[in-house]
Each structure stands twice: as structure tokens, then as C-alpha cells.
Amino acid sequence: MTAELFQLDDERLRLLDRKVDAAEGDGILARWEFGRELLAERVGKQLPKGRLDEVAAAIGKSRAEVTKRLTFASRFTTEHEVRNAITNFDSWFRIVNEALASTAHLSAAKDEWSTPEDLYQILDDEFRFTLDPCSSDLNCKTARHYTMLDDGLAQSWAGEIVFMNPPYSEVDQWMAKALDEGKNGATVVALVPSRTDVGWFWDTARYGEVRLIRGRLHFVDDEGNTGPAPFPSVVVVFGPDREGVHFWDLP
């Protein structure tokens, strides 16, 4: 890329960077758009040598901040995913320290993560699950299950004993569905991030039985990668006569 083209790109990046200081949601979206602009400059999988430092100098930000925006754009590939992240994480700080945390592969760019087998076995011994509505054919926990193509949100869970470890980018929709199905007679056991300060948690979890898990769980993806979650987890049970908060110290 010529110096003249870089100058044009830098001007577009400066314009995007000015949007970052807007309201939190718009600022997060601007960071993503900024990162997408940089991704378009890659040759293969790499930016031209020294480009990150040039961009940081052009906008007056640190190299680390530019790298975070680039990582954000590479993991969240669509605007829909980004808007879900804004809803679920609600701040750039939380996106950086949870969704982009280096200790975990758990991000909205890869939503389907297999539940730790020891935790699932404890829950299955108690509930005897009949349906896994948000899984893949590889990580499903029950014989009866729905994949992304089946769209478990659009299916009825009536009469089922459900285990769900929902996509983290759409956890608000799945928790609303679990609450509704629980009111209609299903038993739904949800393993979700313990984000007690966000709207979906207050709108749904308060109507179920909340089990706060001590420590961090380790998840496994479809390719066998494992790592600790960058956030605490909680089990929420929806259904008849399910309420209260419990501190759950797993074996």
C-alpha cells in the first residue's frame, strides 16, 4: 500500500476514532468499525510491518488500544454480534476484560462451548435432562437436541427437562425463553455468566432458583481447546416452585 493510500486510510481512522468518545454503545460500535478498517489492510493475516504503531500515532492512542480494537473486530465478525455484545457486556472495559480476555477462547466469535462434564453430571443426576435446545451435534448433552439450524428459540420446550448453555452473544434471548418456558411448565436449567449488574439477569434470574458457583469453570470447545472462563458462572433453574439464591460450592 502506498504512502498516499495510507494517508487516506489514516484520515478515515481519525474520523472513526472521534466517534469513540460518543455514548458508550456508539463508542463500542465505532471501535469495531475502526478495527474492521484495519482488518481490510491485512496482507494475508498480517498488517504491514509497523502499521499498528503508525495508526496509534495518527490517532494519539496507545498501540495496546489499537490492538484491542483489531482483536475485537476479528472475533466479532458482524454488526449483529457487536450489538449483542453491547447489550450483554454494556461497556468497553467489560468487553476487553471478559470477551477478549487472553485466558479464554470464550467470545461471541465462537459461541458454542461444551459444558464441563463433571458439572453436567451433577446436574443431570439431579434433574435427568431430556432436551438440550442450544448445542451442536458434537457438544450436545442429550439425545434430543436443537442446533443453530433447528433454532431452539423458535421451538416449544413444553413438558421437557431442559439443560441449556446458551450462546453468550445471545444470552438475553435464551434467558427470556427459559423464563417463559418455565412459566409454562417446563423445567429449565441454565448455565450462564454471573453478570448480576446487567438487564437480562435482573429481568429473568430473579424469577428462578439462582445457584452461585464458587470459582471459575473450565470449558471445552468442539476442537478440544480448554481454558478457564474469564467470568464467574451461575446456574439458574426455572420451573414450578423454583426460587431463592444458593451459594454452590462444587466438589
Image (cartoon, grey):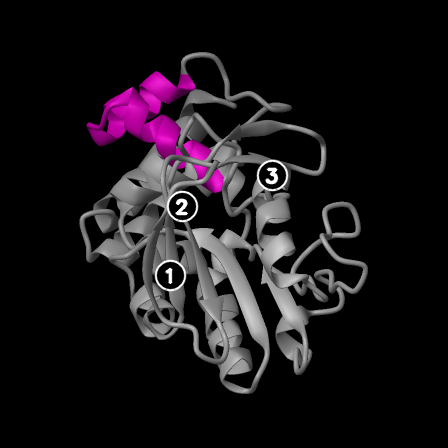
Give the mark nearer the N terminus: 2 vs 3: 2
What amino acid is found at the position of numbered circle 1 in the picture? Val
> Residue at the spot x=42%, y=21% of the render?
3
Most foreground residue, 219 or 20: 219
Q: Which residue is mark 1?
A: 210
Most foreground residue, 18 or 163: 163
Instruction: Describe the element under mark 3 as helix, strand or loop.
Output: helix
What amino acid is found at the position of numbered circle 3 in the picture? Asp
Q: What percent of the width, then of the height, locates residue 245?
A: 31, 61
Instruction: Describe the element under mark 1 as helix, strand or loop.
Output: strand
Q: Is residue 199 left or right of residue 83?
A: left
Q: Is 90 colored magenta in this rendering?
A: no
Q: What percent of the width, then of the height, locates residue 235?
A: 45, 55
Q: Which mark is nearer the camera, 2 or 1? A: 1
> Residue at the spot x=44%, y=66% of the render?
172
Read off the magenta span.
51-73
Q: Which residue is mark 2?
A: 32
Q: Which residue is mark 3?
A: 118
Q: Is 63 colored magenta in this rendering?
A: yes
Q: Quote the CA–CA distance across marks 1 and 3.
A: 19 Å
